[in-house]
Amino acid sequence: MNVRWLAVLLACSGAVVTAQQGGPRLKLTIPAFTDAGPIPLRFTCYAEGGTAITPAMQWTNVPAAARSFAIILTGPENQRQRGHIQAFFWGRWNIPVEMRQLAEGQPRGPELPDGSRQLPSDDNIVGYDPPCAPPGAGPIHYQFKLYALDQALALPADAGRDAVMKAMDGHILGASVYYGTLERAAQR
């Protein structure tokens, strides 16, 4: 086969694959640390003065049919109650579709000025509950997961995590996961 025709064939097959997948996927980034890199202490329970803040977040490649976003922060390796359920640190839903970023230091509270709502963490903190790896446990992974939804969720203001996750089911247009790690030395 002629090299030129092979190049054309490969280029066309790449275009078909991209068209079938609907273009680039939703992408979450956190400028303060690399994907799967260490989370700076100011975003953890080890923040100076004990006052942790949310990292800034940005997202691109939003599906055209998106109508809202949700962000969930979990610790898949944190077994707080010695069970198999992931530790839950933060949940925010009904983030307006016009938004493509969250600034560093988001406020706590059930309802935010943009109309989005926040869920209580496992520690009953309504808003960002910072990751907190146990000393001496080695590096612990945390997942920041962004969802693009085809609708805003019609739920009561006091909806819990299970209700929000159930309401999202069947409405997820895309998702992106960004990992961070946290490791604290053993106490002596």
Image: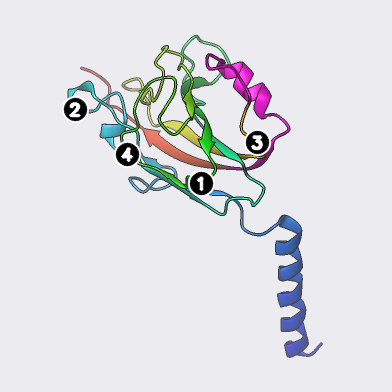
Q: Amino acid at mark 4?
A: Glu
- Residue 95 vertical position relative to residue 85 in the rendered view, above or below: below
Q: Residues within 10 Å of mark 2 (few under 14, many from 20)?
A: few
Measure the alpha-carbon separation of dots 1 and 2. 33 Å
**179 and 97: which one is in front?**
97
Measure the alpha-carbon separation of dots 4 and 2. 16 Å
- Residue sitting at 35 percent across and 41 percent down? 103
Q: Which residues are magenta?
A: 154-175
- Residue sitting at 45 percent across and 32 percent down? 141
Q: Quadrant of residue 140?
A: top left
Q: Amino acid at mark 2?
A: Glu
Which residue carries the number 1 mark? 98
Q: Residue furthest left?
A: 49
- Residue sitting at 44 percent across and 19 percent down? 110
Measure the alpha-carbon separation of dots 4 and 3. 26 Å
The label nearer to you, 4 versus 1, is 1
Q: Amino acid at mark 1?
A: Glu
Q: Position of residue 152 (x, y in %)?
A: 61, 33
Residue 74 makes an appearance in the image: no
Q: Earlier in the sequence, mark 4 or mark 2?
A: 2
Which residue carries the number 3 mark? 151
Dot 1 lies on which element?
Answer: loop
Q: Earlier in the sequence, mark 4 or mark 1?
A: 1
Looking at the rendered image, the quarter that the N terminus falls into is bottom right
**59 and 114: which one is in front?**
114
Q: Residues within 10 Å of mark 1 (few under 14, many from 20)?
A: few
Q: Earlier in the sequence, mark 1 or mark 2?
A: 2
